[in-house]
Every structure is written in C-alpha cells, then in structure tokens.
Amino acid sequence: MTALVFGGRAIKKFRRTPIQLLDVAVHPVVFTLIFSFLFGGAIGGSIDAYIGYLVPGILVMTLLVTTGTTGAALSVDITTGVYDRFRTLSIRPGAVLVGALIGDVVRYALASGVVVALGLALGFRPAGGVPGVLAAVLLVLLFAVSLSWLWTLLALVTRSPSAVLALTQAVLYPLSFFSNIFTTPTTLPGWLQAFVDVNPVSRLVTVVRALMAGTAPGASLGWLLLACALLTAVFAPLALRRFRSAG
C-alpha cells in the first residue's frame, strides 16, 4: 500500500510538470517519422511495406531510452535530498523505489500508446490484432521495468543526474542502432551482423514483431523472460541495499 502512495506521488509530479512527459511523446514521433518517410522507401521499398517492420522496433527503442531518463529523474530526487527525508520515515525502503517504478510504468505505457497510435495512423496493421499488440506491449513493459532496476542502482551509486543520463545513453543508443530495429541484419557487413544477431535488443525486437504478427515467438520468448527475472533478481536487491545504506 505504501508503494502505491509513492507511485501516486510520482504520477502527481507528471501532472504538475507535464514537460517530464515530453520525451515519451516526442521521441517516438520523431524517430518514426524520420525513418518511415525519409528512409522507408530506401530500406523497405515503400513506406507502407516498411511501417510494419519499423513500429515494433520503435516501440522497443522508445521504452529502452525512456528507462534511461527514469534513472536521471531518480537521481534528481536523490541530489535534492528528497530520498534522504524518505529514509527517516518508518516505512520499508522498498516501498520508495517500487513507488517510483510505478510512476515509471505509467510513462512507459504512455510511450507505448503513442508509438502504436502513430503506427496505426501511418498504416500499420498488425496481423496479431489487439491480443498480439497487447502481448508485445506487456513484454516490452516487463523488460523496461526489469532494466530500470539497473538504472535505479546506478542513480543511487553516482548521485549525479548528468552521469546517469550520459551512461545510459552510452549503453542504450549503440545497442538500439546496432540492432535489427531499423533494418534486417542480412543487409549489414558480416562483422556487424554477428553483433546484431547476439544483441539482446535484437532478440526483444524479434519477439515483439512475432507477437504483433500473430506468429509463435519461439524459444527467444523464454530467454527474454529469464533475462527479465535475472535483471530483477540481481539489481533490485542491490538497489534496495544501497538505498538503505546511503547516507
């Protein structure tokens, strides 16, 4: 229940300062429009043919990048002393961090809605229908929340918003661009194709495309669920321990 209270606090911050939602609204729109209209014909043959390939990838990229700004926002609360005051309260430390993640889930869900709505407006018609799209969105949300524990720990360790943002961007953007988000690996040089094939982002995008297309995702779905479990099992306890011990 306490976690829900802190989750409500995070959501109220969005209402007071809507600019915090700017990234989840602008980022997917910009990348979708740029790659569909400027590069869609060259990459996919036509915009209509490419949009079905692009939208699942943009969904993954948007939520991954948004997890980075989540860590930076958490770091702001830390540096301003907000979390120091929370530690003086008679509450479980996990409630504070879980509450922050609840607010993050709202941002991730809004970003997902923007991507899907824009894709539909541009002609995206997923063969998997509503169930396939919902399953894909839920999977990406789960992965984003699991990854957020890593950035939460990073924010608690560095206590610097700029450092968190720089580090997350240094990791997330290369993983996103050197993946199968924008083009099929078969069109890439051999050395780069080898990296793209083992890139976890590529695995996630492949499963999301399969779910939206209404086809079986195969064993990759199991590996992704295992990755989510491992990310949470490793970094959530470390973040909670760091939060309790930070002075």
Image: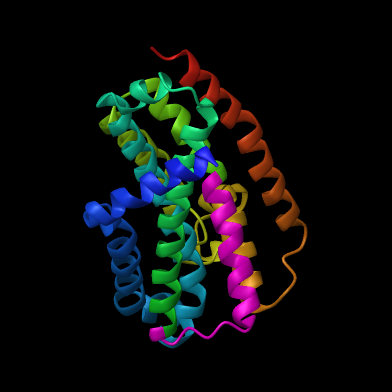
User: Residue at position x 53%, y 25% from top?
Assistant: 240
Q: Quadrant of residue 75?
A: top left
Q: Horizontal and vertical percent for residue 226?
A: 71, 44
Q: Is residue 196 visible?
A: no
Q: Horizontal and vertical percent for residue 231?
A: 61, 37
Q: Is residue 207 visible?
A: yes
Q: Nearer the viewer, residue 179 or 28?
A: 28
60 over 156 or under it: above or below: below
**Quadrant where the image shows the N terminus:** top right
Q: Horizontal and vertical percent for residue 142?
A: 59, 52
Question: Is 160 left or right of 243, judged from the image as shown?
Answer: left
**Quadrant where the image shows the C terminus:** top left
User: Magenta residues, as a range?
Assistant: 121-145
229 over 28 or under it: above or below: above
90 over 24 or under it: above or below: above
User: Residue at position x 45%, y 79% from top?
Assistant: 51
Q: Nearer the viewer, residue 141 or 18?
A: 18
User: Residue at position x 44%, y 87% from top?
Assistant: 123
Q: Nearer the viewer, residue 86 or 180?
A: 86
User: Residue at position x 40%, y 18% from top?
Assistant: 88
Q: Horizontal and vertical percent for residue 112?
A: 45, 65
